[in-house]
Image (cartoon, helix red, strand yellow):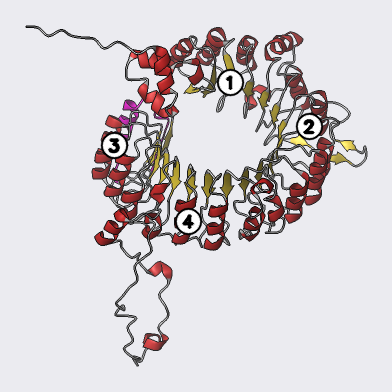
Amino acid sequence: MEEDVIETPELPVEILVYILSFLHPSDRKEASLVCRSWYHASQDLRFQKKVTFHFPASISSLELVRGLGTKSCCSLVISQLDGFSMSRSLLLEVGLCLGSKLESLALPGSSITEASLLTLLPHLTSLRRLDLRGLDSLFMSGAFLSREEHRQQVRSALSGLEELDLSDLRYLSDLTFNRLTSCTPHLRRLSLAGCHIAYEFDPYRGCPVGAVEDSSALLSLRSLRRLLTEQKSTLVALDLSRTSITPESLRNIAQVRELVLEELRLHGCKELTDYSVEVLVKHQPNLQKLDISACTELTSRSVEAIAHGLESLTHLSLSRDWRITEKGLADLLSVSSLRSLDLSECLHVSGAEIVKGLTGSSDARAQLEVLNLKSCTYIRDLAIFSLTQLLGDTLCELDLTSCINVTDLSVRSIATYLQRLVVLRLGWCKEVTDWGLLGMVETTKCDLDEETEDNGPRFTRTFGNMGFFKPPRLPFEERPKLVTQNDLEQFRQQAGASLLALNRLQELDLSAISKLTDSSIIQVVRYPDLHCLSLSMLPEITDASLVSVAWHCRSLTRLALSHCPGISDCGVAQAAPYLHRLQHLYLSSCNNITDRSLVFLAQHCKRLRTLDISKCKNISVTTVDLLQSQLPFLENVNYKFIGGADLTFSL
């Protein structure tokens, strides 16, 4: 008798959409491959916001663009465009299929002509962001948008443009800048980072260069000021990083009548002084995001001005401002709106004043979500212990890279108090050991080492061999005390906080912590949502760590294992089947990696985009070529010094 086959009814798409809404985007992407109904549910409009498609210019890209025509909106990043027919056809196809749906367009690493771009721009009626960064081919001749009919076509299409990126344009002049910005009357964000801007004043005329007539060679302060004046009602963000802006020029910009900036980036503007920051704060008190990193003339006087003048500040970067000290940091941390603070490479910061500023009531102190203390070598355990307790309810990202005085005590306090952490970077903290990651206190040594046991002085002819003159062993001469099986059993039974308690981690950097071994990596690195992991330069880890990480961290998209001599083909063979989402893999100087590993990667890691196998002496160029032919998304392979070759391949 035949059994009746009862088909399970499909769930309504609304329920599938609701279920998928709880998944991380990468998990949702995996779920969309299960069946057709799940795929359709994953295409719901609520999941398609801010979706950006990256692809190089090629014949296959034409079909991709046509397929995107079914979406209600999208953003594109198209690289490697040139002036040939294929690129022109691709841009034309973008205009025809996506013209009214495209919200953002970027063309990095391209060299296109004005004619090619003008066939596209008039179709982009919904464009909100245009990135022309580094497109010198457009501006080299100075004739871009020189014809009135072209400007009218572009103006009608780009009247709603809100963000324009003109960074790193060597040939941007007054003429081309004024023509282009006249077509974008409602800008909210403008980037001129790395552009050659004439800020200097002519001592004979008493005015900035280019003030009399538009320059055919350089963008002048006059044109920039004119734009700010004309679009003062909408413009809120300006990026002048890596330009030669002077204090007087910054004052002229800050004093534009009725201009209210919310975001200003001045990274690497080395001529700025404390006075210029004080003037800026006075005339632009509504700034919420300020980047004055790598402005090497600034001192703590600037910090004090910011602390007392910017009451709405949320993000501040002081990275590589080497003259800044602790002074003023307590006042800065009393700004209740502050959410992100970057003090990386501020070499005189010890953290004491940061702690002092955070000890007030919760309403009168910063609620930091991001704190970067990279290379602040005066930071010690006491400061970290205090900070973790004060920021436990808010901090999501902590960078302690190269804080060389941080030890296991800091790691245990991080694991105990910072349960909300999503990003943790501890690279180059060489005093951290397995015990810190495991949340345990290192057991004491009961027996004296034979060399340190007191056997009395040994008199010999060699002065340096006398027992009582023997110098102490240096830290780098000592091997880490290994964790025993009994220690691991104690770890499994204890209730103390190990790094495993940070179950929200998505990025973890443990590179160059040379005392770490398999004992802690296997037991602690078990994060299902971890996307980026760096274990480079860990000489004590082996394949066991790699296999454990692959098994427990299946969401990994980026994995760094460079300079790990214990990683071999055996580990890659066992780990690769669990790393389906891996996109970036770094295996430089892993000499036990051979051609066999590339075969396993080709079989299981189909989404690989970046692979670094430089200085892997047992890999052949022939196998690399085969790998490139088998992985469709592979864009960059670094294989310097493999098999005697010195090559770097980049699609």
Q: Tell me which residue sits at (70%, 50%) in the image.
A: 332
Residue 626 on the magenta span: yes
Choose mark 1 or mark 4, whichever is in front.
4
According to the image, label 1 marks what residue?
A: 105
User: On screen, 568 above or below 481?
Assistant: above
Task: Describe the element under mark 1 as helix, strand or loop.
Answer: strand
Task: Choose the circle earlier in sequence order: 2 or 4.
Answer: 2
Residue with the most extreme left position = 1
Q: CA distance from mark 1 to mark 4?
A: 45 Å
Choose mark 2 or mark 4, whichever is in front.
4
User: On screen, 156 above or below 281?
Assistant: above
According to the image, label 4 marks what residue?
A: 413
The image quadrant of residue 6 is top left
User: What amino acid is found at the position of numbered circle 3 in the picture?
Assistant: Ala
According to the image, label 3 marks what residue?
A: 576
Task: Describe the element under mark 2 as helix, strand or loop.
Answer: loop
According to the image, label 2 marks what residue?
A: 260
Q: Is residue 515 visible?
A: no
Q: What residue span does the magenta drawing correspond to?
A: 618-640
Q: Assess whether mark 1 and mark 3 are in contact (beta carbons under 8 angstroms).
A: no
Q: Nearer the viewer, residue 274 or 396?
A: 396
User: What amino acid is found at the position of numbered circle 2 in the picture?
Assistant: Val
The image quadrant of residue 221 is top right
Q: Tell me which residue sits at (58%, 57%) in the image.
A: 376
Left/right placement of residue 574 relative to residue 389 reads: left
Task: Choose the circle earlier in sequence order: 2 or 1.
Answer: 1
Task: Describe the element under mark 4 as helix, strand or loop.
Answer: helix
Task: Choose the circle earlier in sequence order: 3 or 1.
Answer: 1
User: On screen, 405 above or below 42?
Assistant: below
